[in-house]
C-alpha cells in the first residue's frame, strides 16, 4: 500500500505523553479488523500500546465494565475500535451502554483524549445499526473526555463479507446502492495519527477512492474470488433503501481519500 497523507488530520497538534514523552494508548477492540491495525501503526510509531478486548492481554468487557479501571490506568489516549454485532438490543449493550461506561472509566482514570470511529452517512440512514452509531457518537461529543472522531466509509473487508452473506443458492443479491469502500489499513493509519494529536473536537472524514454501485463490486468480487453466482438486483424498500440508493454512505468531501481500490485490495488478500 502506498502511504496516504495522514497529515491533513492536522489542525490538532502532536501530543506528548505524561511521563517520558511516549504516549500510552489503549485501543479498545484492539483485536478487531480496524483495531489490530491501529495497534500495529501506533507501535510502529514508538508509542506504548495496550490492546483491549474480551480476548486480549488486557481483558475488558464493555457490556459490564469488567477490567476497564486497571486497563486504563496511566493511559493518555483511548481509541474506541470496538464493535457490537447481532440484534440491535444486544449491539446496543456494547456500542451505546458500553461507550458510556468506557467514557466514565476514562474520566475516572484522567484519560485526556478519546478517539471514536464513526461511519459516513450513519446519521441519515434509518437502520438500527446506524442509529446505534449515532447514539454512540452523541455520547462521545457530549461526554466528559476531550474527543476526536474518524468517520470512514465501509471497509473493503466489510464489502466482501456483506456480499458473501448476500449469496445463496447461486445468487448474489445486490440492492441498488452506492458504496465507497476503503482500505481498513488506510483508515487505521488516520486513526493512529489522530490518537497522537491533541483532541480536535471534530471529525476527519476518510473515504475510499471510488464511488461504485454495489452490483459492480459484486461482479469484481466474483471475478476476484472465482465465484459463479448470478448477481441479482433486489429492491430495498422505504427511506433506508432510498438513502442507500442515493449514496448516503458515500462522500465527495473527504479530508483523506484512500488510494487502494477494491480490485487492488482483492488481489492482495484472501477475502470471504
Ligand atoms: N466495518 C466497517 O466497514 C466500518 C466502516 C466504518 C467504521 N467502522 C467502525 O469501526 C469500528 C471497528 O469496526 P471493525 O469492523 O473493525 O470491528 P470488528 O472487526 O467487529 O472488531 C470488534 C472488536 O471489538 C471487540 N469487542 C466486541 N465486543 C466487545 C465487548 N463487549 N467488550 C470489549 N471489546 C469488545 C472485539 O474483540 P473481542 O471479541 O475479543 O472482545 C474486536 O476486537 C466500529 O466502531 C465500526 O462501526 C466500521
Image (cartoon, helix red, strand yellow):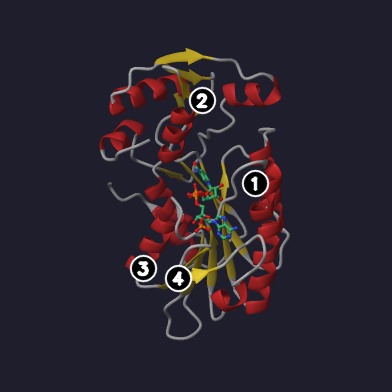
From the top left corner, tell me how far across and down residue 24 is, in percent. Answer: 47, 75
Q: Where, by quadrant of the figure, is residue 241 drawn?
A: top right
Q: Nearer the viewer, residue 218 or 251?
A: 218
At a point 70% along the width and 69% down the height, the residue shown is: 104
Residues tagged 2 and 1 counted as in contact (Cβ below 8 A): no
Nearer the observer: mark 3 or 4; the answer is: 4
At a point 67% along the width and 34% down the height, the residue shown is: 127
Q: Earlier in the sequence, mark 1 or mark 4?
A: 4
Residues tagged 3 and 1 counted as in contact (Cβ below 8 A): no
Q: Earlier in the sequence, mark 2 or mark 4?
A: 4
Quarter of the picture holding the C terminus: top left
- Distance (Cα) linking label 3 and label 4: 15 Å
Q: Where, by quadrant of the figure, is residue 157 drawn?
A: top left
- For disc 1, does the CB lie below 8 Å from ligand 1? yes
Q: Secondary structure at mark 2?
A: strand
- Distance (Cα) linking label 2 and label 1: 20 Å
Q: Which residue is mark 3?
A: 43
Number of other residues with Cα within 10 Å of mark 4, as a class: few under 14, some 14 to 19, many 20 or more: few
Nearer the observer: mark 2 or 1; the answer is: 1
From the top left corner, tell me how far across and down residue 76 is, in percent. Answer: 53, 75
Residues tagged 3 and 4 counted as in contact (Cβ below 8 A): no
Q: Which residue is mark 4?
A: 57
**Farthest bottom residue?**
19
Q: Which residue is mark 1?
A: 133
- Distance (Cα) linking label 3 and label 2: 35 Å
**Farthest front residue?**
169
| Vertical arrangement, residue 170 with respect to residue 122, above or below | above
Q: Which residue is mark 2?
A: 178
Amino acid at each position: 500500500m502506498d502511504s496516504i497523507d495522514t497529515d491533513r488530520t492536522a489542525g490538532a497538534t502532536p501530543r506528548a505523553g505524561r511521563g517520558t514523552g511516549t504516549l500510552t494508548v489503549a485501543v479498545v477492540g484492539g483485536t478487531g479488523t480496524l483495531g489490530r491495525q491501529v495497534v500495529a501503526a501506533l507501535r510502529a510509531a514508538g508509542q506504548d500500546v495496550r490492546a483491549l478486548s474480551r480476548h486480549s492481554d488486557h481483558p475488558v468487557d464493555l457490556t459490564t465494565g469488567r477490567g476497564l479501571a486497571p486497563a486504563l490506568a496511566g493511559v493518555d489516549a483511548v481509541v474506541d475500535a470496538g464493535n457490537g454485532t447481532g440484534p440491535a438490543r444486544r449491539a446496543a449493550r456494547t456500542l451505546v451502554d458500553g461507550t458510556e461506561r468506557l467514557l466514565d472509566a476514562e474520566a475516572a482514570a484522567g484519560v485526556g483524549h478519546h478517539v471514536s470511529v464513526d461511519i459516513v452517512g450513519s446519521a441519515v440512514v434509518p437502520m438500527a445499526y446506524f442509529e446505534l452509531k449515532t447514539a454512540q457518537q452523541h455520547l462521545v461529543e457530549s461526554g466528559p473526555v476531550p474527543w476526536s472522531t474518524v468517520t470512514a466509509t465501509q471497509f473493503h473487508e466489510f464489502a466482501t463479507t456483506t456480499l458473501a452473506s448476500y449469496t445463496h443458492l447461486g445468487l448474489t443479491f445486490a440492492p441498488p446502492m452506492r458504496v465507497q469502500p476503503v482500505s481498513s489499513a488506510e483508515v487505521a493509519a488516520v486513526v493512529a495519527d489522530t490518537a497522537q494529536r491533541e483532541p480536535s473536537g471534530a471529525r476527519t472524514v476518510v473515504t475510499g477512492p471510488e464511488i461504485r454501485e454495489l452490483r459492480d463490486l459484486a461482479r469484481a468480487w466474483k471475478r476476484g474470488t472465482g465465484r459463479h453466482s448470478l448477481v441479482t438486483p433486489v429492491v430495498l424498500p422505504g427511506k433506508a433503501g432510498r438513502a442507500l440508493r442515493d449514496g448516503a454512505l458515500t462522500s465527495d468531501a473527504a479530508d483523506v481519500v484512500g488510494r487502494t481500490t477494491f480490485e487492488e485490495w482483492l488481489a492482495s488478500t484472501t477475502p470471504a
